[in-house]
Image (cartoon, rainbow, N blue to C red):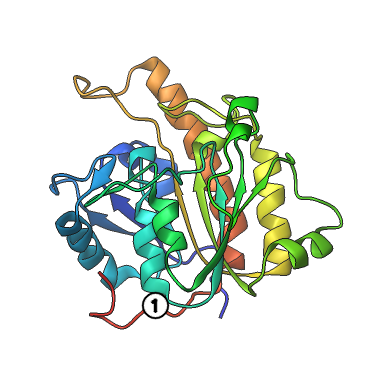
């Protein structure tokens, strides 16, 4: 079953960043309000991860999810834990998020390493991080790093070598985008939105996309109540990117098979 473009997507309201994107939110969506949950920014201890997983469980059937600022990218780990079917993770991110793990916590910088410990995540294909300083560190033998700005050609032959599973999960942190196309409070990449969309279209033509998530929103400073002019410009760039990503992904999504309640944590 393919998801139609007007099918609801999921909004995890962790930090209010998506509430400033009315055009995106005008489309059908389901919202889970998690703003009240403490101990979740940038990292989460087991009890916080359990609370987040419980909140996500009723919505796991919704294949496309938006989750807010980059500090919450570890949400992808929870989505992958619940999927429990062989997948390759396609990670579009300016950072590999596979730093050495820390005891008793999952962070926005090491969640990929935790994901690779799941037996059904066969490989991570990381697109992004083309700056020379990011090329010095290949963090895990099952992470394939891709530096091409657009999908390699011929794409089908490349996909057969690079992606070992029929099903893929896509995770996008918009810090992978060049500043003209996306805005985050982290350092920016140099992938254009057109290049990202070309990747998504190529992947949709050669693999089943069983789930996807998108984050890397612009955050207001703690003292701000409403966005200023600079914030509004940044938020609008992100909203345009979010809508374009959804328009490409939504028709291509084939929902996966979430674990039964009680099997995720």
Residue 104 or residue 208, whichever sits in front: 104
Which residue was labeled with disc 1? Answer: 258
Q: Is residue 22 left or right of residue 145?
A: left
Residue 120, position as x, y percentages in the image:
48, 73
User: Is any part of residue 29 visible from this angle?
Assistant: no
Determine the secondary structure under disc 1. Answer: loop
Residue density around tag 1, few if under 14, some if 14–19, many if 20 or more, within 10 Å: many
Residue 76, position as x, y percentages in the image:
40, 56
Q: Is residue 222 left or right of residue 69?
A: left
Q: Residue at the spot x=18%, y=46% of the render?
A: 35
Quarter of the image where the C terminus is located = bottom left
Location of residue 41 by image quarter: top left
Residue 168, position as x, y percentages in the image:
58, 67
Q: Residue at the spot x=47%, y=67% of the render?
A: 7
Residue 9 or residue 149, whichever sits in front: 149
Residue 136 or residue 152, whichever sits in front: 136
Q: Is residue 11 left or right of residue 128?
A: left
Quarter of the image where the N terminus is located = bottom right
Q: Is residue 222 above or below residue 141?
A: above
Q: Residue at the spot x=32%, y=69% of the render?
A: 59
Query: Looking at this rendering, what residue extends furthest in the top direction?
Result: 229
User: Is any part of residue 118 visible from this angle?
Assistant: yes
Q: Is residue 93 above or below residue 236?
A: below
Q: Residue at the spot x=75%, y=49% of the render?
A: 151
Residue 244 or residue 214, whichever sits in front: 214
């Amino acid at each position: 079953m393919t998801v139609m473009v007007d099918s609801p997507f999921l909004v995890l309201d962790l930090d209010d960043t998506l509430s400033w994107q009315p055009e995106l939110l005008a489309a059908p969506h389901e919202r889970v309000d998690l703003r009240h949950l403490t101990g979740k920014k940038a990292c989460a201890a087991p009890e916080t991860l359990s609370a987040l997983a419980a909140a996500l469980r009723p919505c796991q059937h919704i294949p496309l999810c938006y989750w807010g600022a980059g500090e919450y990218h570890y949400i992808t780990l929870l989505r992958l834990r619940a999927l429990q079917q062989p997948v390759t993770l396609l990670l579009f991110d300016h950072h590999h998020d596979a730093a050495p793990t820390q005891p008793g916590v999952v962070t926005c910088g090491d969640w990929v390493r935790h994901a690779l410990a799941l037996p059904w995540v066969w490989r991570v294909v990381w697109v992004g991080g083309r700056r020379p300083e990011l090329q010095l560190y290949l963090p895990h033998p099952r992470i394939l790093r891709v530096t091409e700005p657009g999908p390699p050609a011929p794409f089908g032959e490349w996909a057969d070598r690079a992606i070992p599973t029929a099903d893929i999960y896509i995770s996008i942190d918009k810090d992978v985008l060049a500043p003209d196309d996306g805005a985050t409070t982290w350092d920016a990449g140099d992938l254009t939105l057109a290049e990202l969309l070309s990747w998504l279209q190529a992947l949709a033509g050669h693999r089943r996309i069983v789930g996807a998530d998108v984050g890397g929103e612009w955050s207001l400073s703690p003292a701000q109540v409403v966005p200023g002019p600079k914030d509004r410009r940044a938020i609008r760039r992100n909203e345009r990117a979010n809508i374009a990503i959804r328009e490409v992904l939504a028709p291509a999504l084939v929902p996966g098979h979430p674990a039964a309640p009680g099997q995720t944590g």
